[in-house]
Image (cartoon, rainbow, N blue to C red):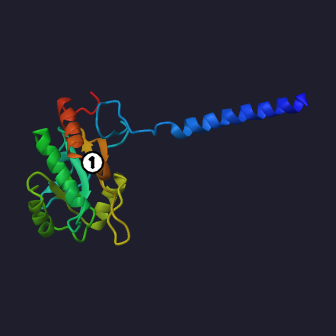
């Protein structure tokens, strides 16, 4: 009889212990993305390589990372027939530049080779009040697909929307900070721009 009681006590103790572990796991705060360099966006690993490209902008001028090397820059992926996410992204970037108090180069790489042309891009930029503040990188499907792949971005298709990201580049053209557009705010992006400018464009100084 004593053995049975002892067994019941042990079962109860084990049950309580397991319940405590389960509750600890369930109620533990969710992990949050953080950086160790003071950025609001996600700090990217140092080993991420520079992914340069050779395209042309809405004025037919050559566009590559070489044109922005030496200072921080913003890189994103847009298309002119987009009615929601792309205009929002442009306005978030515009607001961030206004709040930062200093413009940095902004390059929007097309995710729609056929639809994005100088004649569609120029009025789009004007409508977003980003003429002169954002330049559009245009190219053929093959040229653009190589750029999308190097940045881990999916292009726009009839079946799937493109990847919506904004990257803050350091003075060497390397990706320093990544922002999913779903989490992007003008305040957060402005903070990261100002922080990078204060470090002379060095991502981790």
Which residue is tagged 1? 184
Q: Position of residue 50 (x, y in %)?
A: 30, 44
Q: Residue at x 29, y 38 (%)?
A: 40
Which of the 4 image quadrants contains residue 4?
top right
- Residue at 31% in and 52% down: 182
Q: Looking at the rendering, which quadrant does residue 170 occupy?
A: top left
> In this rendering, is residue 95 above or below 84?
above
Left or right: where does residue 116 sit relative to residue 39?
A: left
Indicate the quadrant containing the N terminus: top left, top right, bottom left or bottom right: top right
Name the residue at 41% across, 39% down: 32
Looking at the image, can residue 171 be seen?
no
Q: Nearer the viewer, residue 104 or 89?
A: 89
Q: In the displayed image of the protein, which residue is found farthest to the right? A: 1
Camera-side residue: 70 or 115?
115
Q: Where is residue 121 in the image (x, y as percent from the top left)?
A: 14, 64
- Tell me how many marks there are: 1
- Relative height, residue 29 to residue 59 (above, below): above
x and y, in percent, of residue 124 in the image: 13, 64
Q: Which residue is drawn at 17% across and 68% down?
A: 117
When asked about the image quadrant of residue 127, the answer is bottom left
- SS of the residue at dot 1? loop
Residue 184 appears in the rendering = yes
Which x, y percent locates residue 108?
Answer: 21, 55
What is the quadrant of the C terminus in the image? Answer: top left
């Amino acid at each position: 009889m004593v053995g049975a009681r002892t067994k019941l006590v042990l079962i109860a103790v084990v049950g309580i212990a397991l319940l405590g572990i389960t509750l600890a796991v369930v109620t533990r705060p969710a992990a949050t993305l953080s950086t160790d360099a003071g950025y609001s966006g996600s700090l990217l690993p140092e080993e991420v390589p520079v992914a340069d490209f050779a395209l042309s902008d809405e004025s037919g001028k050559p566009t590559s990372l070489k044109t922005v090397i030496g200072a921080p820059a913003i890189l994103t992926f847009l298309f002119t027939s987009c009615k929601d996410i792309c205009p929002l992204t442009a306005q978030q970037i515009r607001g961030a530049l206004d709040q930062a108090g200093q413009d940095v180069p902004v390059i929007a790489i097309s995710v729609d080779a056929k639809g994005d042309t100088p004649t569609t891009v120029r009025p789009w930029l004007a409508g977003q009040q980003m003429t002169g503040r954002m330049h559009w990188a245009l190219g053929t499907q093959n040229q653009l697909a190589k750029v999308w792949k190097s940045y881990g971005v999916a292009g726009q298709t009839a079946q799937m929307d493109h990847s919506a990201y904004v990257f803050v580049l350091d003075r060497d053209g390397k990706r320093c900070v990544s922002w999913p557009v779903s989490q992007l705010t003008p305040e957060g992006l402005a903070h990261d721009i100002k922080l990078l400018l204060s470090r002379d464009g060095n991502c981790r100084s």
